[in-house]
Amino acid sequence: ADLAAPGTPQRASPGTPPRRTLRNLDKNFSDPKEPDSKRPRRDSSARPELSDPKQPDLKRQQQRAAAAEADAAKEVEFCAELDRYGVSKASRGSLLPLLRQWGPARTAQILGLWTFLGDGVSRTPASSCTQVWGPAGSGKTAIVSSFLKGMGIRHLWLDCACFVSLGELQARLAEELRRLVVAASTAAKVATPKELQQRVPPGRQLRALDRLEAVMRPSLGHLASMALAPGSGGSPTASRVTVVLDHAQELPRISAGALEALLSLPEVLQCGSQLSLVFVSRLPLSNLGVLHAREPPSVAFAPYSAAETEALLFAVLSRSAEAEAPG
């Protein structure tokens, strides 16, 4: 083959791929952007007109006026219900804030709790045992807790779902009662007896009634002596304790006779007259195996309707906004 002269480009042999073009590494500036005719251009010089904060907001004033009228109508309704139940003036000061908080949807339930549990001062409980039942989310636990705290009723709380045996539950009941009495004695600046300074050992079981009686007697006895002491006021409810058994539908799982045993505590214990039991459950106790003749009086909670849920949420959010508002 003939050789090409020097300086002349050589021809590529057949089948050789074409030579790649090298990229230019010089700086390339993009062309100036042209305005998009489809998108409206915003004038930066034009500013939205701001309303004067000093001028009253008419819409907000109308909402406040409507809320005030609704609150006045509810207040009249609450007072009519209190008159119908025969609530004394001493109890109205504690009941009205609860009625305003939970609204007309739970007025009957709050007054039912007042009927059976008393007011913590002059009105004693109408029954030694009370059941509060209703579906989940109906406000049973929250309203019972709010009622007991608002009325100043001495109480202790037990969650039945946390126990595996009746002996464990009764041991926890005795220990919580001891702590409650020690705290009341400390608040009243009264010397605590030596037998109340020793706690119930963890894991201890109190199955027999005589052992439960022996452990609870010092606590209830000291509470009764404090109520009779000079300067205590002599209130008939000062020596009473309300025991709330939450999730009581779990008691049949703990023991077949757990419900009957707990219902009989105020009757079989010597100091049982100082106890009031409240069973908070999703079902009536008669559906859990309690005979109708033994079933205590009940406060039933129906589920919230859509309108009641909306009114309750509006009231809660309104109170939260008023609390966070400056001044």
Image (cartoon, rainbow, N blue to C red):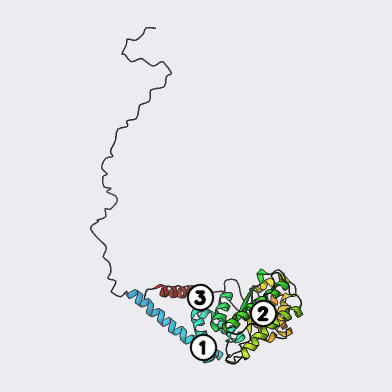
Kind of residue at badge 1: Arg
Kind of residue at badge 3: Glu
Residue 190 in percent (x, y) is at 60, 85
Q: Residues within 10 Å of mark 2 (few under 14, many from 20)?
A: some
Residue 312 shown left or right of residue 294 in the figure:
left
Q: Which mark is residue 10?
A: none
Q: Which residue lies under the disc numbered 2?
A: 196
Q: Which residue lies under the disc numbered 3?
A: 308
Comparing 272 with 248, the one in front is: 272
The residue at 46%/83% (across/down) is: 74
Q: Earlier in the sequence, mark 1 or mark 3?
A: 1
Mark 2 vs mark 1, CA separation in Å? 36 Å
Residue 59 in percent (x, y) is at 34, 74
Q: Which mark is residue 92?
A: 1
Comparing 322 with 103, the one in front is: 322
Mark 1 or 3: the one toward you? 1
Q: Quadrant of the N terminus?
A: top left
Mark 3 vs mark 2, CA separation in Å? 47 Å
Q: Residues within 10 Å of mark 1 (few under 14, many from 20)?
A: some
Where disc 1 sits, the SS reads helix
Mark 1 vs mark 3, CA separation in Å? 24 Å
